[in-house]
Image (cartoon, rainbow, N blue to C red):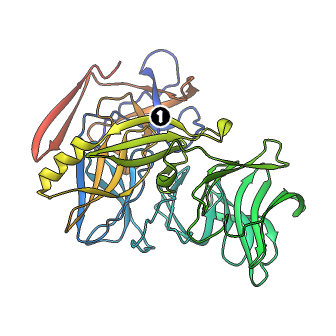
Amino acid sequence: MKGKTNSALGGGGSGGGELIFAENALNKDSVEAGEKVLLRRFTATPEIKCYRTKSNNILCSPILKDRFIIYENTNEPQGLYTIEDDLTFKKITAFSHLISTSSSCYERALLFDNWLFYGNPSNLFYAVNLRTLDNPYFGYIKYSGCENFFFTTAYSAEIFNFNTQTGSMEKYFTVFQSIPYQYTYIPLLFYKDTVAVLYYYYNSNQRIYLYKLNHETQEKEELVYFEETNSKSINTDAALRFPLTPSCYFMQKQNGNNYVLKIDESGKTFYQGVLNCLGFEKEITAAGYNPLNRTFTIIKQEGPQTFLNILRFDPENWTKLEFVEKIDLTDTLENFRQSVGAESISVTKTQYVTEDLRRINLELRDKSSYYGVIINLKNNFTSWQAVPDFPYNYNESTVTALTTGKTDEHKKIEVKATLPEKISVTLNTNDVNATITAEGVKS
């Protein structure tokens, strides 16, 4: 492992190190004093880089925390990798459990503490521990959108709480002891011990029920239900449904409208309203939604130009999306087309933009090939970032530090470290070595 072990071993105060605030990329919100972390600082990177070319579809997974990606290697099993500053991949581990790549897999990848969950549209979920590299399989479960809670979706109606310390699913509540034949049960939301579910007989009107759960007694109280008179308007195989926040659920109905189901803050009732998508109603996808920053990623052609549109969902103003940014990708895609000698390039798969709106993973296609590419949307120096003290995070430009337990108003964490005057990083851009020196890294 390569890295500069230069952190001060003493506590806060004077001497032995400098106190700075760093972006929290430790995969947890609460950081205690005295924890050893690594500091890294992003450098200028390529605008676009192709990491895979195939004659059929590329595995197109989301980028989590701007660094983690699931990748299908030609000669190895699917695995978890980090994306380096020059957009090369560093392998963390190969997966023991493989899933089909014939559809948009891993679109619901999640990160809890040191556990990364991944699965496919059939609600098959696996996890990998970033520290121990354990790779368990949990079967048919669905993420609730709330903290570490999951729903079962096959033949039972249960809620499980994932224990990040033991790596096990612990039963929290049994909503129904069993699902009768020809009944449909679809869990939607779990918020403040209130669960919203679709539950109905196969040829009857659909009903959304709201139950208040008592974890201690395992008893539930039916609060309210909503009956949908058109049985095809909520639940069809083609309908798009996924949680937006712990209290808000997205539903795309057959009539083309997008709806939000929202549990009231009291936890005693719920509301349903049409979501104004600012003209992008048909372009909304589950793969394009990042729950960490509540943004929708939409790529749309406007004549000869290709634009990336970023919209945000606000649970306080839950009936209309907020426009965030519009990025012109035309020149970037044209430069890539010329570099590979393709007659034309089109975007065939889109994942959501990273939490800091800095990167995106796309699948491109010409007449004969598919390309997996990473695009840097923001390409400049950033502030320090604190990452876990894991072996795969060590390189020539990382330095060690100790946390003080303090945070600022931007949720950056304070660390104590002895910083070098310069950090030099050698990148390989278009097969030409270029050394970039970060001057004044202490600022």
Q: Is residue 319 left or right of residue 423?
A: right
- Residue 412: x, y in percent? 51, 29
Q: Is residue 36 left or right of residue 314?
A: left
Q: Is residue 72 left or right of residue 53?
A: right
What secondary structure is found at the residue carrying circle 1?
A: strand
Q: Residue at label 1?
A: 324
Decide if residue 16 is in sight here.
Answer: yes
Question: Which residue is more in the foreground, 49 or 364?
Answer: 364
- Residue 311: x, y in percent? 49, 40
Q: Which residue occupies 58% across, 39% down?
A: 29
Q: Quadrant of the C terminus?
A: top left
Q: Which residue occupies 80% across, 54% down?
A: 194
Decide if residue 214 is in sight here.
Answer: no
Residue at the extreme top of the image, as rendered: 14
- Find residue 364 and report its image quarter: bottom left
- Residue 157: x, y in percent? 75, 71
- Residue 165: x, y in percent? 62, 55
Q: Is residue 123 left or right of residue 216?
A: left
Residue 268 higher or lower than 230, as above or below: above
Residue 248 higher or lower than 24, as above or below: below
Q: How would you rate the neighbour count of disc 1 (Cα within 10 Å): few for under 14, some for 14-19, many for 20 or more?
A: few
Residue at the extreme left of the image, as rendered: 432
Question: Which residue is more in the foreground, 226 or 392?
Answer: 226
- Find residue 354 and report its image quarter: top left
Q: Which residue occupies 56% across, 49% down?
A: 113
Residue 308 higher or lower than 70, as above or below: above
Question: Which residue is more in the foreground, 390 or 243?
Answer: 243
Q: How many marks?
A: 1
